[in-house]
Amino acid sequence: MPIAGQRAVVNGERPPDPPVKPQGNVPVIVHLVWSDGAEEWRPARAIRWTSTHVMVGWGDEAAERGREHWTWLKAQDVMRSVRWLVPPQRG
């Protein structure tokens, strides 16, 4: 639950039968959809997963430095790398 004035992740989804123990600590990039409608890609780490979902943790901005947030996301919102970013134009 977010504290008053904070955004919440709305694309989180817990799998029906999640693993209980951590399975690793894999660096990933996650797609987050926020309660205010904003979307962003953010670095995170995956610690549990199924064939359809991944539990990820990420740090917050400077206001909450050192605090990690954890949520389950659909696997389609978690990536190890991306190739579709548009490169900057060169002069």
Image (spheres, rainbow, N blue to C red):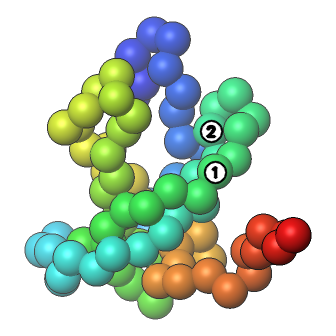
Q: Is residue 77 left or right of residue 21?
A: right
**At 42% across and 24% down in the image, what residue appears?**
2
Q: Nearer the viewer, residue 46 or 87?
A: 87
Give the amino acid type for the residue marked by disc 1 in the picture: Glu
**At 47% across and 83% down in the image, what residue appears?**
80
Q: Is residue 78 left or right of residue 37?
A: left
Give the amino acid type for the residue marked by disc 2 in the picture: Trp
Q: Give the structural element (helix, strand or loop) at label 2.
A: loop
Give the tally of numbered discs: 2
Q: Give the structural element (helix, strand or loop) at label 1.
A: strand
The residue carrying pointer 2 sits among few (fewer than 14), some (14 to 19) or many (20 or more) residues within 10 Å by Cα, namely: some
- Disc 2 marks which residue? 34
Q: Compared with residue 82, is residue 86 higher up or lower down, i.e. above or below?
A: above
Coordinates of residue 19 in the picture (x, y in percent): 24, 76
Q: Nearer the viewer, residue 73 or 60?
A: 60
Q: Is residue 35 left or right of residue 9?
A: right
Mark 1, mark 2: which one is toward the viewer?
A: 1
Which tag, 1 or 2, sits closer to the chain's start?
Answer: 2
The reply to whether residue 19 is in sight is no
**At 59% across and 58% down in the image, what residue appears?**
41
- Disc 1 marks which residue? 40
Q: Are marks 1 and 2 in contact (CB under 8 Å)?
A: yes
CA–CA distance in space, label 1 to label 2? 8 Å
Q: Compared with residue 48, is residue 58 higher up or lower down, i.e. above or below?
A: above
